[in-house]
Amino acid sequence: MAGSDGSNPNAWLGLLKWSLAYSDGTKPSGENVQQMSKEDIAFLESVMKDGIIDEGERMKTILKDLTDSLEVTLSAGVAAAASSSDQEEKRKELDEDDMLELMQELRDIVEQIDYARAFMAMGGIPFLLGCAASAASKSIKKGALSILSTMCQNNPPVQLSLLEHGHMPPLIQLFFDYTPAMDSSNEGDDSMREKVVQALSASIRGHSMAEHIFCQNEHGRLMLQLGLGMQKSADTKPSAQLRKRSLFLLRAILTSDEATDERHKLYQNMISYICTHEINEEWEDDAEIREMSLAMLSQLLTKDPPHKVVSETILSHKNQIGSFGVKRIDCIRKLEEGSDDREYASLELEEWERIMVALVESK
């Protein structure tokens, strides 16, 4: 995340350390402090004796340890050479396993909405974004993305703060950084791309402004196409987990209450791809992805009031969908009743029956 003026690419670590030194993220600095009563003091003493952890303080300690360790790791010896030996001895450097363990603990803490917002107030968002885009190891990057996904899901203030920090372009670029190159110069990493899509999805879903901004982003739409595997052959598709994450996000933004014909037109090619590929057993071998695709098409087709663009797009493939459906329903119904295979395919059968009814009822 080096600035265009050649500034220190790890400056975000210094900013977080300053923030942690002057704020605990739990209250405005100007809030009046009242003297504690004897009862309050006695209660706090009993809490300390019982060993109850102050999650806010623990979170601050974790961030401090992570910041110090990452600062050493990412400085590549430059900052280390300039520091005195005494300073280096005081600095707590953790190995990667220890850092990942702390990140997991931090993720568990920010699952609670209030602690997620406290983390945000401590300067946690630029820390996570900086960590994900830094030269840290893939494991550390994934850890940062996982924390980001957890803290912003269904948390509008955190989602808004991410928008204010301009999180979409760097995360979308991170997805492309780990996308396989056509000339095989970059093998890519689907597990990293899956984490990026998960983080973006959590930051976008349910937030009207975030949804609108993402849908207008051409690179964001290309990211979803690549995540779905639209540019790949059946033998070289992205991982099933990446395809599921991408499909989940696509369904969320297309079926959102904020979705319009204008939005559906931007994603028309992806809707068509779902109709012609993702519900076709000969192309898509993952039953869960087929179920998700069928459920999305049914939901879009039965929307009340209906959306013209999406309805016309799906119905333009009516014959092909019907052909897939008749063949697949017949195949599932021939499976032995009560068998594991029949049980496994039951959800897909329900989705096929639902979409077939929707196609018949649609004009």
Image (tube, rainbow, N blue to C red):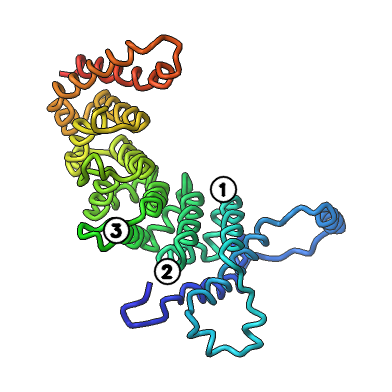
Please say if the residues under marks 2 and 1 sit with CB atoms less than 8 Å apart: no
- Determine crowd level at label 3: few under 14, some 14-19, many 20+ residues with C-alpha closer than 10 A: some
**Residue 127 picture location, percent across and down:** 49, 66
Q: CA distance from mark 2 to mark 3?
A: 15 Å
**Residue 39 picture location, percent across and down:** 86, 54
Helix, strand or loop status at disc 1: loop
N-terminal-most mark, 3 or 1? 1
- Determine crowd level at label 1: few under 14, some 14-19, many 20+ residues with C-alpha closer than 10 A: some
Residue of label 2? 134
Residue type, mark 3 in image: Phe
In this picture, is 260 found above or below 127?
A: above
Res 176 label? 3
Residue type, mark 1 in image: Glu
Helix, strand or loop status at disc 2: loop
Classify residue 3 by image quadrant.
bottom left
Along the viewing direction, whichever of 130 and 81 lies nearer the viewer? 81
In this picture, is 130 found above or below 300?
A: below
Res 111 label? 1
From the image, which quarter does the C terminus lie in? top left
